[in-house]
Image: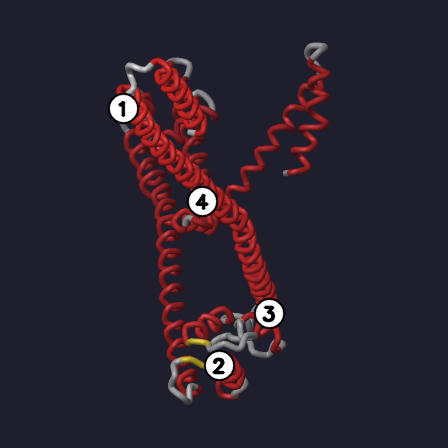
Amino acid sequence: VTVLGCADAWVLTPIVAYAAQDGDSPLSSLTVFRMLRLFRLVRLVRVFRKFGELLVLIKTIKHSVKAVGWMTLLLGMLIYTGSIFTLLLLGQPYKATYPEVELHFGSLGRTLFSHFRLVTLEGWPAVAAAAMDQNRWWAIYFAVAIIIGNYALVNVMVGIIVEQVIRFTLEQEYSRASFDSKAAQLRSTMRTFFDAADLDHSGDLSRSEIRSLMADKRAHEIMTTFGINLDIPPDTLYAIMDLNGDDATTFEEFFDACMRLCGSTENVHSVFVQQDVCECHEALAREMELLEKELQAATAKAAAPIGSSIRGLETQANDDDVAVEAELRELSERLDRFSWKQAQLHDELQALKEQFDFVQGSEPELGSAAASAGAAADVAGGVASTG
């Protein structure tokens, strides 16, 4: 399929495109090879395995081909014999006179097609009417032909296919019931051996105890009876049964390991395939564990700068709060000093006013008071600049 697709894409398509430029060309017939790509549809057969009922039908058709083929041959012989009979007795004598006879029985090909219509019951009244217009005794012939061709042979074909479907369905149910019965028997037997090896009645066994149990001759014989091949290398056996570790094993784990080995006496190759699968599973588990550790480390590494940045921001915010608080405290102290200076200046001005009122009549004393007031004003200006 791949080779045909490559040939079509890289060889036939360019050739046909080049030939099409000159009109009709014999090379245009090469497009027929493109139909070969329809063989790709064969890949759909793999989908049938996922649908049990469809798989039963496919198997039924496969096993019914021989019987249906013989029935088809018998039906063909019956149609051919009846066609020759009606052509000689009905078609040749009356086809020149009656158009209906010419239409249905004028030649061997038309007679074969008319009998095929009788077998399939497709438009048989018109075929029978054309013959019965010549002689009503032809009704007996067509009745016998329909009974033998349709109700006997065609229905027998259908019956064969239905019988095959029922047989395959019953075989599947029987196989499933037989497997369940054998699995239950194997489970009971393995449970007996498991309990016998569990000396401390803890409900599980160590890997060394399971190895000793499997080395027991009696257990070896019973497992061989169930199709478990124990004559394989121990490393391979322990890899399939997952017995290379040192932790305890429950009965369910041990029974699942035995179920994976069922049928290995008949197909040794499947044992090594299972070993490869188990080893790949273990390697994948280790890789997943390493990736998980690396992911955790990367997550922790990425979270550390974020935490330090947050702590830095918190520290900077605390420093800013302290600075603002210090500035507010300094401003409060300056306001207190300004209030004190203001009260002191008010007292001095009040004293000067009283002194000025006392010496109001004296000119020299007035000049002295004015000088004192100017000095007081200078003091007030100094206090204001200090604030």
Identify the amino acid type marked 4: Asn
Separation of marks 4 and 1 at Cα, in angstroms: 55 Å
Look at the numbered disc 4 and give the secondary structure of its residue: helix
**Which sits in the foreground, 174 or 322?**
322
For mark 3, what is the residue?
268
Disc nearest the viewer among 1 and 3: 1
Q: Residue at x 57, y 71 (%)?
A: 239
Separation of marks 2 and 4 at Cα, in angstroms: 61 Å
Look at the numbered disc 3 and give the secondary structure of its residue: loop
Q: How many marks?
A: 4
Label 4 or label 3, whichever comes before in sequence order = 3
Label 4 or label 1, whichever comes before in sequence order = 4
For mark 4, what is the residue?
318
Identify the amino acid type marked 1: Glu
Label 1 or label 3, whichever comes before in sequence order = 3
Q: Residue at x 27, y 24 (%)?
A: 354
